Image (tube, helix red, strand yellow):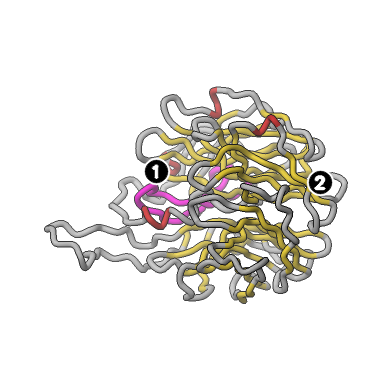
Amino acid sequence: MRRASPAATVRAATLLAVVVAGCGQSTASPAAAAVLGIDWGRVASVERPQVYEETVAPSYVGKHPILRIAGQAMMTDLIARSAGGFAAIGYVPPDWHPTAWTSDDGSTWTLRAVSDTPFTFPVSLARGSDGALVAVGRSGSAPVAWTSPDGVTWTPHEVPVLGTDRTAERMTSVFATATGFVAGGSVGPELLDRHARFWTSPDGATWTPVPDDAAAFANSEVRSIAVLANGGLVAVGVVGSFQQPTGAVAWTSPDGLSWNRIDDPAFSGAILVSVIGGSPVGLVAVGSDLDRRNAVAFTSADGLAWKRAPDEPSRQHSGGYAWMTDVTMVGDQLIAVGTLQGLQRGTAISWVSKDGMTWQQARSAPVQEGAEFYAVIPGGPGALVIGDFGAPDSYVPDVWQTPAH
């Protein structure tokens, strides 16, 4: 799983909203039978925080108040619960406190309180072998983790860091292993250069930082972790600063305690934000090119050598932008999700593939207009995806499913 959204912690600056038209809860009605990964519909209901009313900033002296849509929040990751149903995490403006959602059937989602701690951003979820859920992210300038037995109640846990440099350190991805959890992230200023970090935990509550590797972790951030065919681990991420990434990077590890950096030439000009293992073609990683003009995909048998899927019109948007944010496997089909953007607002979109090299772009429906897809998992039945609509001015959380009903 993913996964921090590449802009997850800086979109706060753009969350002053205007009213967005066409945000009803109607579902798509394709003429033919709905197809997995191709046709999407909104789920029945998603409970949203009612914290935004029509307000006027204290410094505002004009005649037109700023309109803010009620219910704004960032939904950042989701996972299936072992006892059935699903859980998701995210955060709520205006003070950016963590929140969660649960659903017994994937169709109706209930908002759950996590804490009222401000400037706290959970961004990635994993489920342990005992069914416990673990979320990771950051609070202020420090990394933080949460555990939950069911997605309803959550307990925060401090995460130790290396050294005393607390400019900013964050967890951006967490993955469940046979013996516990491995998390990745970075240290460094929010918008500038970053240095990769890894942590391990037996239970999601007690964490140990992996010793720094000046060469392997240099100028990079971990975005996603997956399992290798041999039982080891692979991670992918981004090279360069947050504002000006310069390429992608991968790491492999036998145990999560030491990491070997892979600067494959194929990564040049790409950003990788999500990777999965266990597909018929091995590892599959997705992201975009540096300008987000092309959604990109890579495959690898072992995490050491990577092959980039040739650019194709299905992963481009003429005159605009296209990027993938996450990828999953349903049966023998890969489903990647992301966004197409022309002018101001995007269209949430997905792609399907059998081999990771050739991708078919899904149909878009009115329920996807003005929206962005962030994270996808099997379930629903079919697949579920979380995201927001109203971007880049508003971020109102929603859930979609495929095939559309």
Instruction: Tell me if residue 48 is in the magenta stretch.
Output: no
Instruction: Tell me if residue 404 is in the magenta stretch.
Output: yes
Residue 106 visible? The answer is no
The segment highlighted magenta reads 383-405
15 versus 112 height, above or below: above
Left or right position of 106 against 41: right
Q: What residue is at 49 percent from the left and 34 percent from the top?
A: 291
SS category of the residue bearing label 1: loop
- Mark 1 or mark 2, which has the lower sequence index? 2
Q: Categorize mark 2 by other alpha carbons within 10 Å: few (<14), some (14-19), many (20+).
A: many
- From the top left corner, tell me how far across and down residue 205 is, in percent: 70, 73
Amino acid bearing label 2: Leu
- From the top left corner, tell me how far across and down residue 178 is, in percent: 83, 60
Image quadrant where residue 122 sits: bottom right
Pointer 1 with pointer 2, Cβ within 8 A = no
166 versus 117 height, above or below: above
- From the top left corner, tell me how far across and down residue 257 is, in percent: 80, 58
153 versus 263 height, above or below: below
Q: Categorize mark 1 by other alpha carbons within 10 Å: few (<14), some (14-19), many (20+).
A: many
According to the picture, the residue beneath numbered tag 1 turns out to be 370
Q: Nearer the viewer, residue 396 or 194?
A: 194
Q: What residue is at 79 percent from the left and 38 percent from the top?
A: 304
Image quadrant where residue 345 sits: top left
Q: Which mark is residue 147?
A: none
Residue 356 visible? The answer is yes
According to the picture, the residue beneath numbered tag 2 turns out to be 228
SS category of the residue bearing label 2: loop
Q: What residue is at 50 percent from the left and 42 percent from the top?
A: 244
In the rendered image, the quadrant that contains the C terminus is top right
The alpha-carbon separation of the residues under discs 1 and 2 comes to: 36 Å
111 versus 27 height, above or below: below
- Which is closer to the viewer, label 1 or label 2? 2
